Each structure stands twice: as structure tokens, then as C-alpha cells.
Image: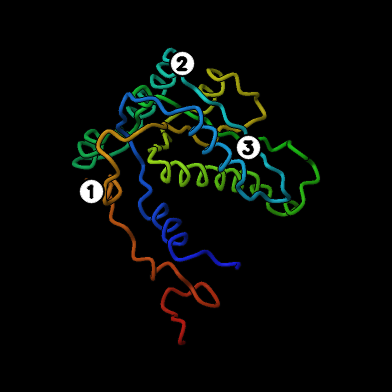
Amino acid sequence: MVEFEADEREAVYKSIYTRRDIRQFRAEPVSEEVIARILDAAHHAPSVGFSQPWDFVVVKDDETKSEIASIAERAIAAAREGYQEPRKSDFGQLKLEGITDAPVNICITCDPTRDAPHVLGRNTMQEMDVYSTCLAIQNLWLAARAEGVGVGWVSFLYPHELREVLNIPHHVQPVAYLCVGYPENGFPDEPVLQQQGWRERIDGDKLVHYGEWNPTKTPET
């Protein structure tokens, strides 16, 4: 049988629809076995030309996490200055990272030189290596959700500083810095930013185009 059984399909969709960006974590450690499983899930993501351009830097040391949290703090402060009131005050109320709270941090990188210069399928779209890395990130995130583990993506960082702290080679691109741990308050019913009124989910039907880019065209027309 090619298709999944009903309960198997339900589990896949449950992981997708209940995945959340988690910012608050319990101090409880995540076992090495669970970390290994979610990293293996990430490594089994599809990649253009089977290039597998990703690496995973697992960070547990408190000193290193504190260094990276300091970078995030400065990046968040700078970003806040780009808003006008009342959005600026709303921004200040958001918890945007849980670097030192989470027991594990994972930096996922992309190496554009892996199997280069002749990566099958990357001739006209050089960014396919980064896109492939994003699939590994999503695999990790969904596997973590299935394990009851929360993940938070910290995008307020300066890549060159992150690269220096983690000793990442200059040619390797940090793509995602993830906080990983058990959620302090479970998984919310809605994304946190939606709960807090920062942004509403867009109606998915408005984002699907048929035949060509035409937001007014429907499957019947």
C-alpha cells in the first residue's frame, strides 16, 4: 500500500497544523535519543541534486548561548527602532527568543560548495541549496512537534557575529538558529503572533493561482 493508513495521515497533519514557534521553555533537558531522532529527520529532507548542503551545530554550553543571546538582544533593539508607535510598543511586548531558556540550541547551516560546482539542478537557480536547507529545518521542526518538543526560530541575529561565535567557516551560511526544548506552557492553539494580535493568518484560498498569476481566477474559470 502506497498511501498511509488513516491514523498515520492524521498524525502527519497533526504535526503540521499544531507546529508552533515556541519562545518559552522548561528547564527539563531533551534526551540525546530525541535530539538524534529529530536531527536524523532533518538529514532525511529532500535536497536539489541530493546535495545535502546542511550541517547542524548543537549548542548546550551556557556561556555560548549567552554570547548568542547578547547578539540577539542588540539585533532586537535595533529592529524595534524601525517601528513607529503604537507598533513600536507592541513590538517591545513580544518575546522574540528563548536562547538561554532552551536546553538545546541548534544552528543549521548551508554549505554552497558541497558537491559544487556541478550540483544537479542548480544551474539556473543557485539558491536551491538554501531552499533545500529550509526543508531540513522544516523536517526537524515537524519531527520535534511529534516528540512533544518545541522549536523557536531566532531570526534577530547578525550572521557574521554568529559565524564567529560558532567558528563557522566563512563560506558556510548560517540559515537558522533554533531554540529547542519542552514548551513551558504547551503548544498554543494559534501561532503566538496571531494570539497577540501582531498578524492574522491570510486566507489560503487567496494565495492559490490557477494556470497563471491571477488572484481572481478560480478552478472553474
Task: In this rendered view, identify the residue nearer to me: 30 or 217.
Answer: 30
Task: In this rendered view, identify the residue nearer to me: 101 or 97.
Answer: 101
Residue beneath label 3, please?
A: 54
Vertical comparison of 187 with 173: above or below: below
> Which amino acid does the dot numbered 2 rest on?
Asp
- Residue for point 62% across, 32% down: 55
Vertical comparison of 30 with 213: above or below: above
| Mark toward the start of the polypeptide (3 vs 2) | 3
Q: Position of residue 54 (x, y in %)?
A: 63, 37
| Mark toward the start of the polypeptide (3 vs 1) | 3
Residue beneath label 2, please?
A: 61
Give the Cα distance between marks 3 and 2.
22 Å
Describe residue 215's horizontal placement relative to residue 203 as left or right.
right
Q: Residues within 10 Å of mark 3 (few under 14, many from 20)?
A: many
| Mark toward the start of the polypeptide (2 vs 1) | 2
Labelled disc at residue 59: none
- Residue for point 39% across, 19% down: 70
Q: Quadrant of residue 95?
A: top left
Secondary structure beneath label 3: strand
Vertical comparison of 215 with 44: above or below: below
Give the foreground label among 3 and 2: 2
Give the Cα distance between marks 2 and 1.
32 Å
Q: Residues within 10 Å of mark 2 (few under 14, many from 20)?
A: few
> Pointer 2 and pointer 1: residues touching (CB < 8 Å)?
no
Residue beneath label 1, please?
A: 195
Secondary structure beneath label 2: loop
